[in-house]
Image: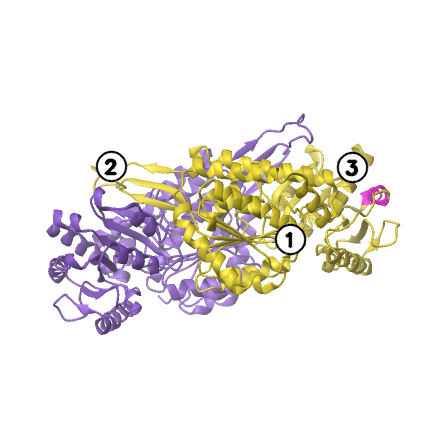
Chain colours: A yellow, B purple
Amino acid sequence: MNYTDASIAEIDSAIAAAKAAFPIYRRISDVNRAAFLEAISREIMALGDELIQSACAESNLPEARITGERGRTTGQIQAFADFISNPVWKKEIHDPAQPDRAPLPKPDLFQTQIPLGPVAVFGASNFPLAFSVAGGDTISALAAGCPVVFKAHPAHPKTGELVGSAISKAVASCGLPAGVFALIHGSSNEVGSHLVQHPAIQAVGFTGSYRGGKALYDLAVRRPYPIPVYAEMGSVNPVILLSNKIAENPAALAAGLAGSVCLGVGQFCTNPGLIILQKKDASFLDLLATELDKLPLGTFLTPGIAAAYTSGVANLAKHAKKLTSRELPSPALFVADAATANHAILEEVFGPCTVAILVEDESELLTFIESMDGQLTGTIHGTKAEISEELVDALLQKVGRLLFNGFPTGVEVSGAMVHGGPFPATTDSRSTSVGTQAIYRFMRMVCLQNRL
Amino acid sequence: MNYTDASIAEIDSAIAAAKAAFPIYRRISDVNRAAFLEAISREIMALGDELIQSACAESNLPEARITGERGRTTGQIQAFADFISNPVWKKEIHDPAQPDRAPLPKPDLFQTQIPLGPVAVFGASNFPLAFSVAGGDTISALAAGCPVVFKAHPAHPKTGELVGSAISKAVASCGLPAGVFALIHGSSNEVGSHLVQHPAIQAVGFTGSYRGGKALYDLAVRRPYPIPVYAEMGSVNPVILLSNKIAENPAALAAGLAGSVCLGVGQFCTNPGLIILQKKDASFLDLLATELDKLPLGTFLTPGIAAAYTSGVANLAKHAKKLTSRELPSPALFVADAATANHAILEEVFGPCTVAILVEDESELLTFIESMDGQLTGTIHGTKAEISEELVDALLQKVGRLLFNGFPTGVEVSGAMVHGGPFPATTDSRSTSVGTQAIYRFMRMVCLQNRL
């Protein structure tokens, strides 16, 4: 089957349907919207093995991973269905009237949240189910009461169509207007560009590259009516290794870190691409290199990502010393001194490679952190005694999620999760794209005064 | 005294001090930050009559109004001090670990809010105390833990200096770094432009004109590291009058509406500049015109605002029929048909004038609402029976606050208040600049995973 780019007329038609559906969709009850989400989940499961096989074939990811990712996707849908089933989710605030207050009576004020309107969502290539057509962006927007126009990722068009058809079946079986959801294809920038600039689109969700996300952001803020863009653009996710923690069990730490670097062929937004440790602990890197040398490279999601990895690691090799022993491309570890490091080596290379930065002491560590870009995650491996308040504070200012003695590649779907962070990790540091708080990206507060 | 524009070096120095103060200020306890806010309030009161006289002289507003506004300002400060004294304000979410969960253990996740960093605030001319140096933007940013660099409004520089000195005294008496607050003057655009583009500034608060707010927004989103801009830029605040409600007590409605139009010489962001009613009810406008003809014009805040009002109403007179009888400039009522109205008449004219739009029926009313720009407020005067769900929904999509049978000019400082709304009323519809929820504009969520 051929998945041709949507024409301008087709995009306009999908958006017009979303706009027409919005006044109806925004008024259906939370209970009915939760039932709709659960119907989506059932329809996805009903796709059965065809979905699994399609996603495996289009992503080169193994069946166990895809099956697990389907579970994450339906679990995520259930989490939003449950979330909007408890009325506290609307964060309503009621300040009762005080008619006798002097000098002026106080009116009755009631604050609640309303959906923004039709949302454009762009799926990621690296999670063909959980961050794609029925992923967190789509489901949080639908849960909020916003119709979604989804631009399928060209890396997995068939999987996208399958999941899109599941959502459309759920739309129909729940008696909702068809415009509540639409899927369009577009391998060219024109499709996304037209979508984001359409006056009826009220917000954008995106997971992908910095180049892609920033381009959409730049279009959205230049519209006559600017709209919010929630672009999650990845980061290098620094992991700081402190001396006493390294000494506790260096072999286990090296094995765990190597596993995190290579998870999913290193194609996670939260892949640890930067390690920071003191010079005196540099011998730990030999252990880490040994572990990485044991791990297979794996098959990348797309030939484009594979080519970018090959050129990315070749470029790193020009500016930093390679510690792993295999020929590139392979899982790779590089090392450089903080004082002399070329900042080009801090740019994300998507895949299973990581750069170690050596610092003299905590003072140089803090200076280095201060110089870093915003990150999705930051991790500290340290004993409680050796982690200073200054270090925690400095790293927290740069990240959306701060981990202690763990690895950043697992992103739990939960109320407390923050999958976000300061620019350029995302275009809106005040939000998360994973977990139930993601719903508020597509809502705004309103106040009803003396409502009848 | 002469209030010269800050030089680039002076602005940089204020921002550098704010940046240096931030790591210290963000770590002081909520209790101590609340005490600091209360100290600001005491220092403002200690300015005594000098402050009142200065604000009256610089704003042309009467003493009773300025005294009342000082009460609003200190009341607002107390509201934020109280708000951060209750730990629930940080909206913490804790998902405990499930170490035995299969297939993967669940980590301990803890979500909280952290301050963004140094904030630039631009004061408004129309509230020289409550929306200026120690107004809601400054106080909500300080309450959040963000240092503030404040650009004083050139319409009331002495009042600004007085309040700025009160804040600086509170900074000193609380033992905080001096950089927690700075006031700079700037009548040129260069000062504001440099401030907003400085890499250490992390967010912007603004109340004023569309032109000013949009210019700051455009600069902020084009920075190498874009930052959020909360610009409240005013609106025409439509008031919809339905037939049965008009019939109940037309004289009282006309008097109330005329009073709201003329409150503070019409210089409120929430001034009702647009009235919508059915053609068959057009005779109500004669009553309203009669009421407006009784009210004095008053003295505008600045000669510039007076001149803009004179040219604004002259322009309206070209495109709509004037119903009030006095020579312009005066409080004024214009009328036009929805079907033929030139959209130029829907642009805000800052001052005590309002435009009535006549519609045939509810269908034309809904179409007209759909065509409107975003608004801070929308008001419906109607009996419960005649207000349709469609009307409420349509208007709610356009506003931050929806009032029933009231007047929009009073903006209560309260937890449930929303003083915000879709563009171009503001540059960020997801926020409020009045009320305690305003604090979250200057914070972002972070997640601590397996914190020690």
Q: Name the residue under label 3.
A: A253
Residue segment shown in magenta: A280-293
Residue A57, placed above or below residue B122: above
Q: Where is residue A424 in the image (x, y as percent from the top left)?
A: 61, 55
Residue B419 position within the rendered picture, expressed as x and y whole percent measured from the top left: 35, 50
Magenta stretch: dominant secondary structure: helix
- SS assignment at label 2: loop
- Tell whether label 3 touches label 1 (CB within 8 Å): no
Residue drawn at 41 percent across, 45 percent down: A26
Q: Does residue B450 appear to the left or right of B441 in the view shown?
A: right
Q: Which quadrant of the rendered structure holds the C terminus of chain A?
A: top left
**Subunit ID for the residue under disc 1:** A
Disc 3 from disc 2: Cα separation: 61 Å
Is residue A234 visible in this depiction of the protein?
no
Is A282 contained in the magenta span?
Answer: yes
Q: Which residue lies furthest to the front in this view?
A: A1
Residue B430 % position (x, y): 43, 50
What residue is pinned by disc 1? Answer: A157
- The numbered mark, 1 or 3, whose residue comes first in the sequence reads 1
Query: CB atoms at circles 3 and 2 under 8 Å apart?
Result: no
